Amino acid sequence: MGLQLKDISLSYKENLVLSNINIEFDVGEVIGLVGRNGSGKTSLINIMNGLVRPTSGLVLYNGKDINNISIKERAKFISVVPQRINFPADYKVLDLVYMGRNPHMDFFHRATKEDLNNTYEVMKTTNIVGLAHKLISEISGGEMQRVAIAMALNQRAPVLLLDEPTTNLDLVHEVLVLELVKKLNSYPKSCVILSIHDLTLASKYCDKVVMLKNGELFAKGNPKDVFSKENIESVFSTKVRVNKDPIDNSTLITPEV
Amino acid sequence: MTNSEQQIYKSNDENYLYNNFKINWIIILSIILLIIGFIAICIGPVYIPILDLFNIFYDRVFANVNTNSNFDIIIFKIRIPRVLLAGIVGFALAMSGATYQGLFRNNLADPYLIGVASGAGLGATIVIVTPIPIYFGFINILPFAAFLGAISAVLLAYFISYKSNSLTLTTLLLAGIAISSICGAITALLMIGSDPDIRPVLNWLFGSFSSARFEHVALVLIYLVPSLLIILSFSRFINILQLGEDHAILLGVNVEYVKKILIIAASLATAAAVSFCGLIGFVGLIAPHLVRLIWGTDYRYLIPLSSLLGAIFLILADMIARTVLGSSELPVGLVTAFCGGPFFLFVLRYQMRYR
């Protein structure tokens, strides 16, 4: 059992942002959320992490409603890499990664061996050990994204949500981050959910994709099945060519210009 | 990277995370504070040689002999309460300033930001200007009026910006500014409408430690000590808050609770501090800024270090205030502005050049 969304609807005043979303996310999978800008991806992620309460419906983790437990408890099993992070410029990378341990600390906490080992471990996983004592202002955008992922990993939560982790990254860092994400679903046996715009990369790296259209669940399942010409053209209202990658059989999507 | 290299990184990091409270600097600043405190007790219109000071101290505290000499009276009735109060007020103002700066995520925040100062000013002015007697029996009600004014102003700003279980800091700040200007206007109106002699009000508005007594020190401490403990134990959360409120929630911080507690603690400490000595500007801004410049931004040490620095700064400022004009005295708020202002400008320029 993993994260379960039950009849989720969200509306701001008169605007229906999400309607009747029912999805179950299993542990050990990388799930991609795709859809147009404004289709409700970020809203859905914010509902899953508890920042936004759904107008109706429930978010259950192992049968427990995530809006009915304390903020600290929730952070123990749901970790998030937000879309944009306001990194304070004069903190060291190590300080920030260490902040990820917060949900596991009691009130008068001093670092325990476990905290230190975990912090070191996630920095190794995200390959930022060498940056530990650099200031945030001294590192690049791609490195910042890895720091953000390390912070979230340090929570050791079984659910990891990433809101467009590859936006604003170049090809190299896009691939680096996605390789890392791919590795994570087996890391502490976890369920990784990310929203992503690049459909080709999504089909390469995600085990399952969820397609949203105007706040409704349009399709879900294996990327090979979901990313059909008809589905993509319907969701994105753009003519596309859909091909198979000759090497790994993933789906290649190019706009028809 | 080889394994041995990683091992080195790891042990360094552990050291860093374990010892990142700058405890040695806290001790060094405490010692400096103590030394400056003693010097400040000696210096004044009447100079007391430091050896005499120690002798009298020894007699009174350990041998329990009360010599009742002139020095004895000056030391215990005037100088010690005065230096203690200056130190404690500086400590409280710098602590609140650092806390507000962390909460509002803005290095320009100072302890008077959300209305404490103008509320206290209004409270004090009402007592001084209107026919309300300043002395109620033997008790001077001026500090209590100032305290009440400060707390009312903050509470008003607080409730205006509190909606459906959440406190919006931007609204709090704006409400604080609006309330400040309203209180300021009423204060001015009262001063204009009163008898021509408004010097007591001006004196209060610029701050002075000339009437310091042990009871004042004790009363301020009643508010300062719990506030300090709360703020220190919440300082880890202030660090996390620098990422923004939403991200802090995602990292498991109960942001609403932390904001509420910290605002209450810092405002109470500030209100208590200003109610006995008047409005002393600049300490709450300059001390945290200097600490940030020298040591960095981690609030776990920024708050204790800037508090100590604030205490040192205000003891020195008060020392200058009571010596520079010979027999008469300058308001200490003027000294902090005169010395602190140019110094702060120098620091800003220096910082620009070496960034």
Image (cartoon, coloured by chain):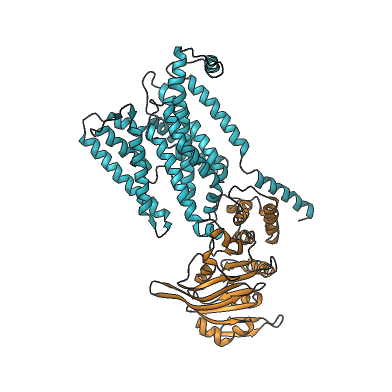
* Residue B309 place in picture, x, y as percent: 52, 35
Question: With respect to residue A188, does B221 lie above or below?
Answer: above
Q: Nearer the viewer, residue B91 or B126?
A: B126
- The residue sitting at 58% across, 63% down in the picture is A81
What x and y, as percent, mark residue B197? 24, 28
**Residue B133 point in image, percent of width and height:** 26, 30
Q: Is residue B344 visible?
A: no
- What colour has chain B? cyan
Q: Above or below — where is A161 with respect to B23?
A: below
Identify which residue, B17 or B338, lies in the foreground: B17
Q: Name the quadrant containing residue B332.
A: top left
> In percent of the image, x 54 and y 42: which residue is there?
B302
Of the pair A45 and B165, the residue shown nearer to us: B165
Looking at the rendering, in which quadrant would you find the N terminus of chain A? Answer: bottom right
The residue at the far bottom in this view is A230
Q: Quadrant of residue B147?
A: top left
Is residue A79 visible in the rendered structure shown here? yes
Q: Is residue B243 above or below residue B148?
A: below
Apparent side of residue B151 relative to residue A197 in the rendered image (left or right): left
Q: Colour of chain A?
A: orange
